[in-house]
Amino acid sequence: MEAEKRKILIIDDDAFLLDMYALKFNQNNFDVYTADMAQKALEKLKEGLDPDIILTDIIMPEMDGFELLEKINSEKLSENSVKIILSNRGQQSDIDRGNSLGAAGYIVKASSTPAEVIDQVVGILAGRKFKK
């Protein structure tokens, strides 16, 4: 029996990385939604998108990933989504801030191949119970 596809929303302003991660997650049994800016991600969530996972970059123009998580939390959007940060910034202060905003994981792009990113996301999901 085929496993149920999980919905993932990937937010990254780097079009190449966004397309590459979308392709890789799609190949690994995920329904993929993308946004190239935090504001677009917020709009999709407000329109009713309720992904199982929100995978967001931190460094983006206009609104960074931390601000995005703050807005998602304050506006009670997608409350059951597992939020994971995927960033090139790996400072402990960033990891701590992500944790304080409810991120279930923090993956450093520069030290993870796309396959490792998927493995880490799947591992984080395995530790969570879903209320769907």
Image (cartoon, helix red, strand yellow):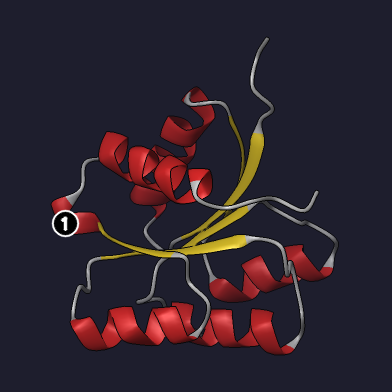
Q: Residue at x 41, y 53 (%)?
A: 15
| Residue 66 placement (x, y as % from top left) | 46, 83
Disc 1 element: helix
Q: Nearer the viewer, residue 92 or 7?
A: 92
Quadrant of the image containing the N terminus: top right
Q: Is residue 61 visible?
A: no
- Which residue is painted at 52% across and 87% down in the image? 67
Q: Is residue 75 above or below residue 116?
A: below
- For image coordinates 22% across by 66% down, the residue present is 88
Query: 10 above or below 13?
Result: above
The residue positioned farthest toward the left in the image shown:
111
27, 127: nearer the viewer: 127
Q: How many marks?
A: 1
Q: Is residue 46 above or below residue 66?
A: above
- Taking the view exactly as shown, the residue that stands out farthest to the top is 1
- Residue at 35 percent across and 77 percent down: it is 59
- Give the percent coordinates (x, y) of residue 9: 59, 53
Residue 29 in sight: yes
- Tell me if mark 1 has few (under 14), some (14-19) or many (20+) residues whose alpha carbon lies within 10 angstroms of its own: few
Q: Position of residue 64 (x, y in %)?
A: 45, 82
Q: Is residue 20 left or right of residue 68?
A: left
Image position of 15 (left or right of 47):
left
User: Which quadrant of the figure has residue 3?
Assistant: top right
On screen, 101 above or below 131?
A: below
The residue identified by callout 1 is 110
Q: Amino acid at mark 1?
A: Ala
Residues 16 and 25: in front is: 25
